[in-house]
């Protein structure tokens, strides 16, 4: 693993790479969730690099992990800036011409936005629990997250990854999505623009909800789509159901790049929204 500091969107960001990103092959770029950063992926980047033989890059977005801290709050439109010009700066800095994206939650949604914004560069998207359309489950879950942050142990847990940026990071994530008006928010127009293959993995026990996002993919998506809704799995299938996720990612990689997929494991539960 090699650490990097680079500029994107006018901010100083931190990144880590596994393997050479300038080797000419597609690069797996990982986009973390709304309370996460590179370190919360645990050993998943290394596992993906070993399974695929491709270089992997994970970066901390503005306000997260080792990157520059926030200055002020955010509107829900922040996703479009992150997936558009900021992601474009990342590709340019590292000289990445072709990427396969792996995103979780907020980062899963951004991966789809990036595929729409950079169609020539993004070959495929694997999105775990992408929050691309919301319902009342999101509002309820945000209330639970605030309770856990203020009275539970969530703040201390997050501080191990974000340090003195933790408070600003949490509230910049919480405020836009805790607004009851957020249940009207949808990425349906952008999903309709995605043309590359997509693998979407949801957990049916996701506190933040999954059916609205899955429904948007089915009803508005025009891309080749493989979708799973896993029983007994919550918001983090990349950790709780890693074998299923890695198998889906290998099939996505084969569809996106022509590389041979790994043998498929036993069938998993797939459910339409």
Image: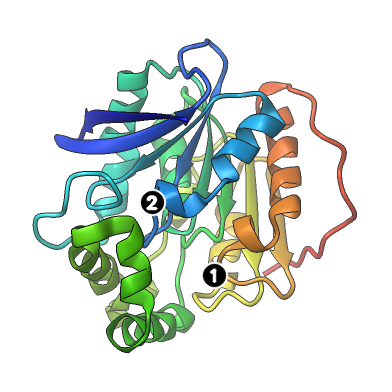
Q: Nearer the viewer, mark 1 or mark 2?
A: 2
Q: Residue at x 58, y 37 (%)?
A: 46
Tally of marks: 2
Q: Secondary structure at mark 2?
A: loop
Above or below, 143 against 227 in this view is below
Q: Residue at x 52, y 40 (%)?
A: 194
Q: Residues within 10 Å of mark 1 (few under 14, many from 20)?
A: some
**Which residue position is annotated with label 1?**
212
Residue at the left extreme of this rendering:
71
- Give the spatial CA distance, label 1 vs label 2: 25 Å
Above or below, 34 against 245 in this view is below
Q: Position of residue 140 (x, y in %)?
A: 42, 86
Between 244 and 148, the residue placed more toward the observer is: 148
Which mark, by number, is residue 112? none
Residue at the right extreme of this rendering:
266
Q: How is the image coloured?
A: rainbow
Which mark, by number, is residue 37? 2
Q: Quadrant of residue 273?
A: bottom right
Q: Residue at x 22, y 52 (%)?
A: 63
Q: Quadrant of residue 218?
A: bottom right
Q: Is residue 63 left or right of residue 60?
A: left
Q: Secondary structure at mark 1?
A: helix
Along the polypeptide, which appears first: circle 1 or circle 2?
Answer: 2
Between 12 and 215, the residue placed more toward the observer is: 12
């Amino acid at each position: 693993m090699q650490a990097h500091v680079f500029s994107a969107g006018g901010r100083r960001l931190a990144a880590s790479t596994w393997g050479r990103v300038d080797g000419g092959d597609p690069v797996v770029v990982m986009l973390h969730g709304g309370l996460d950063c590179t370190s919360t992926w645990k050993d998943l980047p290394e596992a993906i690099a070993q399974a695929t033989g491709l270089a992997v890059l994970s970066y901390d977005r503005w306000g997260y992990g080792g990157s520059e801290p926030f200055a002020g709050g955010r509107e829900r439109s922040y996703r479009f800036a992150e997936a558009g010009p900021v992601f474009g700066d990342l590709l340019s800095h590292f000289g990445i011409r072709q990427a396969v994206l792996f995103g979780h939650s907020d980062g899963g949604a951004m991966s789809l936005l990036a595929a729409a914004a950079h169609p020539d560069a993004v070959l495929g998207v694997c999105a775990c629990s992408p929050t691309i359309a919301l319902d009342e489950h999101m509002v309820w879950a945000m209330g639970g997250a605030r309770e856990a942050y203020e009275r539970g142990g969530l703040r201390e847990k997050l501080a191990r990854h974000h340090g003195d940026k933790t408070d600003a990071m949490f509230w910049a994530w919480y405020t836009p999505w805790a607004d009851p008006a957020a249940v009207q928010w949808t990425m349906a127009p952008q999903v309709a623009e995605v043309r590359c293959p997509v693998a979407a993995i949801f957990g049916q026990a996701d506190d933040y909800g999954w059916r609205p996002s899955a429904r948007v993919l089915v009803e508005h998506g025009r891309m080749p789509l493989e979708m799973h809704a896993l029983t007994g799995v919550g918001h983090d299938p990349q950790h709780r159901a890693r074998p299923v996720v890695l198998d889906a990612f290998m099939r996505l990689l084969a569809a996106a790049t022509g590389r041979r997929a790994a043998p498929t494991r036993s069938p998993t539960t797939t459910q339409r929204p």
